Amino acid sequence: MRLLHTMLRVGDLERSLAFYTEVLGMRLLRRKEYPGGRFTLAFVGYGEESDHTVLELTHNWDTSSYQLGDGYGHIALGVEDIHRVCEQISAKGGRVVREPGPMKHGSTVIAFVEDPDGYKVELIQLSSRAAA
């Protein structure tokens, strides 16, 4: 078995695609409209679905926003230079909601950004340049 994708419902598909592709650097892998069901699915990621876990963005045409609820946590992305990545995200209009720094009660350097629908994306420093 392997994890295939995580699905998020989004209120404005074009705005979400711009965030995940232009701000976070993912690629649009495939997109399909389902007129009978009034929804569109768009899959984005850093590699092909055959080899990587990807993100499914589901846009229900008649819904412009969702209540995120208190059960959702975040999506996590590993990055080599968390400070540089946060600067790039901010420069592209992304919202960094927790600046890079050690996690509470630990030493792993993390940061959080928020997508246009309010979903949190955690950035985790992968290399030894954590406190650079």
Image (cartoon, grey):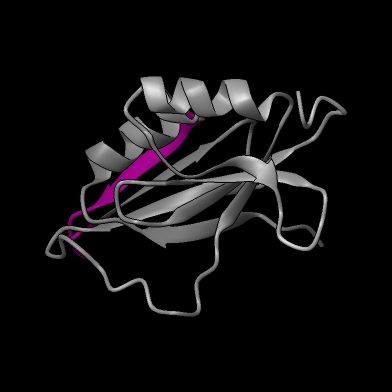
- Height in image: 24 above or below 5? above
Residue 79: in sight, yes or no? Answer: yes
Residue drawn 57% across and 54% down? 75
Would you identify the image quadrant in which residue 74 lies? bottom right
Front-most of 62 and 92?
Answer: 92
**Residue furthest toward the left?**
62
Question: Relative to 11, does residue 102 appear above or below in the rendering?
Answer: above
Residue 54: give x, y in percent of width and height.
59, 45
Instruction: Name the image quarter holding the C terminus.
Output: top right
Question: On the picture, is 20 further left or further right than 104?
Answer: left
Highlighted range, magenta: 27-39
Indicate whether residue 12 is drawn in magenta.
no
At x 20%, y 63%, the residue is: 65
Q: How many marks?
A: 0
| The image quarter in which residue 1 lies | bottom right
Residue 21 in which image quadrant:
top left
**Where is residue 115 drawn, in percent x and y?**
38, 46
Residue 33 shown in magenta: yes
Q: Nearer the viewer, residue 29 or 103?
A: 103
